Image: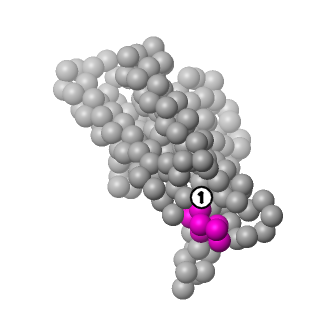
């Protein structure tokens, strides 16, 4: 049963990776890569590909004990946990670029978000020594620690905050609230 569960997740991640690669490399999409929003979208796609690949790797290598497996497990799990907040910051950057016409780092919220991200990444890199985000048993079985939930919490705060910001922006008669922006919000909130 557990093996079937792992195979399901591995296959799901592989299919998602292939779809994302197709989107990134498709001819129709590559012709419109000149705007800031499109470049950020490409970064989001690449980050999602890392997310899928690292998740697949974490499922595949969990419990494996060959030489080097422990290092691989640390790497793929640190990358996996890092990707949620990185993707949310990229999405926040894309939203600010579309709505305000400026990049996220030009704003106070952007500087705070990046500072928090750097602190989180530092703590994640320390995981092999501190068990901050997860621990690995002697048999290389992965177990989450409290730190593993900080990245998703950070992501949820961004998603909720940006959604509320866009709603208030629309009510104030902001310069750009259109179908594309509503789709930008819906594509991240709808799966929840």
Residue 173 in view (yes/no): yes
- Rendered-image quadrant of the C terminus: bottom left
Which residue is at a point 64% across and 68% down the rendered structure image?
138
Q: Residue at x 49, y 32 (%)?
A: 119
Where in the figure is residue 173, as x and y percent of width and height? 22, 20
Q: Residue furthest left?
A: 171
Based on the picture, tell me whether residue 137 belongs to the magenta stretch: yes
Is 129 placed above or below 93 here?
A: below
The x and y percentages for residue 51 are: 58, 50
Name the spot of residue 36 as percent of width and height, x first: 56, 23
Left or right of 4 in this view: 190:
left
Q: Quadrant of residue 44?
A: top right
Q: How is the image coloured?
A: one colour
Residue 165 shown left or right of residue 51 in the figure: left
- Residue 91 horizontal/vertical position (percent): 46, 35
Q: Residue tagged by mark 1? A: 55
| Rendered image quadrant of residue 95 | top left
> What stretch of residues is rendered in magenta?
136-142
- The quadrant holding residue 73 is bottom right
Magenta: predominant secondary structure element? Answer: loop
- Picture layout, residue 12 above or below residue 74: below
Front residue of this view, candidates 24 and 142: 142
Q: Residues within 10 Å of mark 1 (few under 14, many from 20)?
A: many
Quadrant occupied by the N terminus: bottom right
Identity of the residue drawn at 78% across and 59% down: 68
From the viewer's perspective, is 142 left or right of 163? right
Q: Say which element carries label 1.
A: helix
Residue 41 seen = no
């Amino acid at each position: 049963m557990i093996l079937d569960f792992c195979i399901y997740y591995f296959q799901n991640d592989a299919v998602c990776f292939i779809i994302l690669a197709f989107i990134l490399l498709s001819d129709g999409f590559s012709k419109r890569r000149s705007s800031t929003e499109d470049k950020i979208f490409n970064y989001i796609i690449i980050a999602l590909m890392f997310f899928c690949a690292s998740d697949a790797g974490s499922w595949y290598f969990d419990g494996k004990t060959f030489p080097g497996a422990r290092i691989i497990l640390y790497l793929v799990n640190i990358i996996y946990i890092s990707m949620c907040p990185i993707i949310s910051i990229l999405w926040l950057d894309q939203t600010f670029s579309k709505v305000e016409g400026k990049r996220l780092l030009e704003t106070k919220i952007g500087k705070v978000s990046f500072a928090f991200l750097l602190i989180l990444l530092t703590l994640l890199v320390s995981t092999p020594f501190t068990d901050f985000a997860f621990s690995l048993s002697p048999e290389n079985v992965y177990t989450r620690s409290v730190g593993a939930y900080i990245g998703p919490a950070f992501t949820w705060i961004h998603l909720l905050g940006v959604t509320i910001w866009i709603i208030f922006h629309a009510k104030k008669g902001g310069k750009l609230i259109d179908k594309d922006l509503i789709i930008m919000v819906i594509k991240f909130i709808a799966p929840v």
